[in-house]
Amino acid sequence: MFKAIIVLLLFLFSSNSYSQIKPYILYNAKGKKVSHNKMLRQLAKADIVLFGELHDNPIAHWLQYKVTAELYNRKSLTLGAEMFEADNQIPLNRYLNEEITFKELDTLARLWPNYKTDYAPLVDFAKSNKIPFIATNIPRRYANLVYKNGFSILESLSEEEKKWIAPLPIPFNSELPTYKNILSMMGDHGSPKLVMAQAIKDATMAYFILKNHKNNHLFLHFNGAYHSDFYEGILWYLKREKPNLNYKTITTVSQKNLKKLLLENRNKADFIICVDRDMTTTY
């Protein structure tokens, strides 16, 4: 599937018959078009990059791989992803070290359903090039506990279990616009505890990013766009702990017309991948 997407994109960009078809355009935060190379130059200067994706968007996944491969030639990398829960780090490491097969990884780790098409290329790139790949997300079962009971339930976890989450108590600002927006988006299904569950994910991902960041290395992290949009979520927690690091963010949006970035999509990130709404999805 991933190879087919690359072939399709190369065809679109190289064929004279389709020279005017552009499945995506890159913008900066202000809505000005920016080149891929300019984005890459700025990313290479960063300490930490948060690459926000729409989980089923093939352009985002293709660019994640492309950006990873290009940055690898410019700077020492550490990779990490929301799509791996922290307590799966051991089997992930064993796969990266070629101690177990993919089939064994699939048995031992809780891989996302779209792993083979969307994330395996990144993990296999890390394996081939001996790049650390960090499982940054809180185990889902603990996030579900917060959703049902609030933060206080986490204090009842064992010391072993607490290794897989951000240190307690976590800072929490319910007034952040993206957190407040969760309540409005979810309507009757929204609750303060739902926002807490989002926050514990953001805090835990930030914690494991900083724990594994090395000087003179770039930590490239892949996450759902909402976890870093508008410079909040994960980035809010990162900046609380290490405000002086150089952070860059990328997000992915979908529009019917790519010629102009909509006002609602501006200032979401340093770089905005604006994808044609008609683009096929990966699932």
Image (cartoon, rainbow, N blue to C red):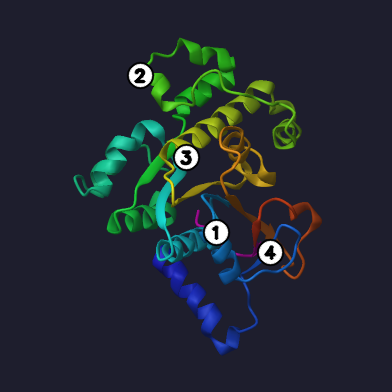
- The residue to which callout 2 is attached is 160
Q: Please tell me whether residue 61 is drawn above or below residue 239 in the rendered image.
A: below
Q: Nearer the viewer, residue 1 or 73?
A: 73
Which is more foreground, mark 1 or mark 4?
A: 1
Chief SS of the magenta region = loop
Residue 41 x %, y %: 55, 65
**Marking on residue 209:** 3
Marks 1 and 2: in contact by CB < 8 Å? Answer: no
- Upstream in sequence: badge 1 or badge 4: 4
The answer to whether residue 1 is seen in the rendering is: no
- Upstream in sequence: badge 1 or badge 3: 1
Q: Distance from label 4 to label 3 (Cα)?
A: 26 Å
Q: Distance from label 1 to label 3 (Cα)?
A: 16 Å
Marks 4 and 1: in contact by CB < 8 Å? Answer: no
Q: Please tell me whether residue 71 is drawn above or below residue 102 in the rendered image.
A: below
Marks 3 and 2: in contact by CB < 8 Å? Answer: no
Q: Which element type, helix, strand or loop, lies under badge 2?
A: loop
Binning the other alpha carbons within 10 Å of mark 4 as few (below 14), some (14 to 19) or many (20 upward) gives many
Q: Residue furthest top?
A: 156
- The residue to which callout 4 is attached is 27
Q: Which element type, helix, strand or loop, lies under badge 1?
A: helix
Marks 3 and 1: in contact by CB < 8 Å? Answer: no
- Upstream in sequence: badge 2 or badge 3: 2
Q: Distance from label 1 to label 4 (Cα)?
A: 14 Å
Q: Which element type, helix, strand or loop, lies under badge 3?
A: helix
**Marking on residue 43:** 1
- Upstream in sequence: badge 4 or badge 3: 4
Q: Distance from label 2 to label 4 (Cα)?
A: 44 Å
Residue 51 x %, y %: 55, 52
